[in-house]
Image (cartoon, rainbow, N blue to C red):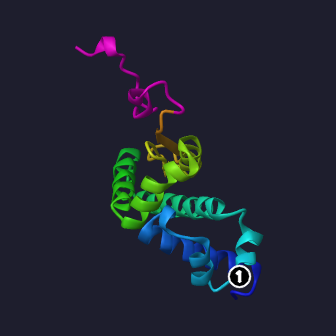
Amino acid sequence: SEGLPEGVRNALLAAARELFAQRGYAAVGTEEIVRGARVTRGALYHHFRGKQDLFRAVFEEMEAQLAQRIAEAAASAPDPFEALRIGAGAFLDACAEPAVQRIALLDAPSVLGWEEWREIGERYGAGGDGLVLQVRGPADGEDADLGVDGVDAPDEREATRDLRQPRIEDDDVG
């Protein structure tokens, strides 16, 4: 029920997400958020340090949901490359949604700062320049981590290489 602490927190997150998606962080005041959530200003400050902290929670929730959507979309792929293709498509589809554009792509980098925006994105596997999928390996049943995040690899070519295939050095390509 909404009277319980998690219900109040969820109401604040839902109201803030809707308002931030419609008009952007800068155009939304805390009074409007608490009114939309049907809670008191004290409830807001009980759960969050302020508007920026609430925005961070909205963004993290969005990133977690996006990562889940990508994983679900890619889960039925017959091989890791198809999973990457499907996952990348799901990520790009999400990026076309107005709420994702406004909150995750436009406001989050400026509200949270570049470093925190990237850290949160990487934590959930779908950051501003990355996409990491956990998929079932077709041959051995092991989880295969297909990363395009530049973190585990020295460059983008390395990041996109299937780790089960022999590496082809730039010198070997004629």
Foreground pick, 62 / 141: 62
Q: Quadrant of residue 64?
A: bottom right
Pinpoint residue 15: horizontal percent, then vertical percent. 56, 77
Give the SS element for disc 1.
Answer: loop
Q: Is residue 11 above or below residue 120?
A: below
Left or right? Give the position of 164 relative to 93: right
Q: Residue at x 53, y 33 (%)?
A: 151
Pinpoint residue 54: horizontal percent, then vertical percent. 63, 64
Left or right? Give the position of 38 relative to 78: right
On the question of residue 134 being in view, the answer is no
Taken as a whole, is the magenta stretch helix, strand or loop? Answer: loop
Foreground pick, 172 / 123: 123
Pinpoint residue 93: horizontal percent, then vertical percent. 34, 60
Residue denoted by label 1? 40
- Does the stretch in magenta take in 141? no
Left or right? Give the position of 51 relative to 97: right
Q: Quadrant of residue 165?
A: top left
Q: Which residues are magenta?
A: 151-174
- Does the stretch in magenta take in 172? yes
Q: Is residue 30 above or below residue 71?
A: below
Q: Which amino acid type is shown beneath numbered disc 1? A: Thr
Q: Residue at x 40, y 30 (%)?
A: 156
Pinpoint residue 8: horizontal percent, then vertical percent. 69, 80
